Image (cartoon, rainbow, N blue to C red):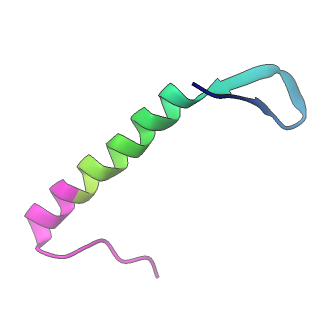
Amino acid sequence: MGWWNVPNKNELIVGDIPLDWIGNLWKELQEIYLESLGRRPAIE
């Protein structure tokens, strides 16, 4: 497990478990989007 200090905020440390949760959330949202609209989300 890794830990990172947030730049300019010495009192805030981020671990990789919350980052994994966010990555999994994005994957789940993409799957829902694909199932609903039949295409991947586009960034314009």
Give me the residue at 30% from left, 51% from top.
27
26 sits left or right of 43 in the view: left
Q: Quadrant of residue 33?
A: bottom left
Q: Residue furthest front?
A: 1
Give me the residue at 34% from left, 42% from top.
24
36 versus 44 height, above or below: above
Front residue of this view, candidates 16 and 41: 16
Give me the residue at 44% from left, 76% from top.
43
Q: Residue furthest bottom?
A: 44
**Is residue 13 on the magenta stretch?**
no
19 sits left or right of 41 in the view: right
Say how many tags the image has: 0
Position of residue 18 measured from the top left corner of the image (x, y, whole percent): 50, 28
32 versus 16 height, above or below: below
Front residue of this view, candidates 38 and 18: 18
Which residues, given as a range, are shown in magenta?
Answer: 31-44
Position of residue 26 measured from the top left corner of the image (x, y, whole percent): 36, 50
Front residue of this view, candidates 39 and 20: 20
Front residue of this view, candidates 3 and 37: 3
Give me the residue at 51% from left, 36% from top.
19
| Quadrant placement of the N terminus | top right
Q: Quadrant of residue 8?
A: top right
**Is residue 39 on the magenta stretch?**
yes
Position of residue 36 measured from the top left corner of the image (x, y, whole percent): 10, 63
Q: Residue furthest top?
A: 11
36 versus 43 height, above or below: above
28 versus 40 height, above or below: above
Q: Quadrant of residue 11?
A: top right
Position of residue 41 measured from the top left corner of the image (x, y, whole percent): 31, 71
17 sits left or right of 21 in the view: right
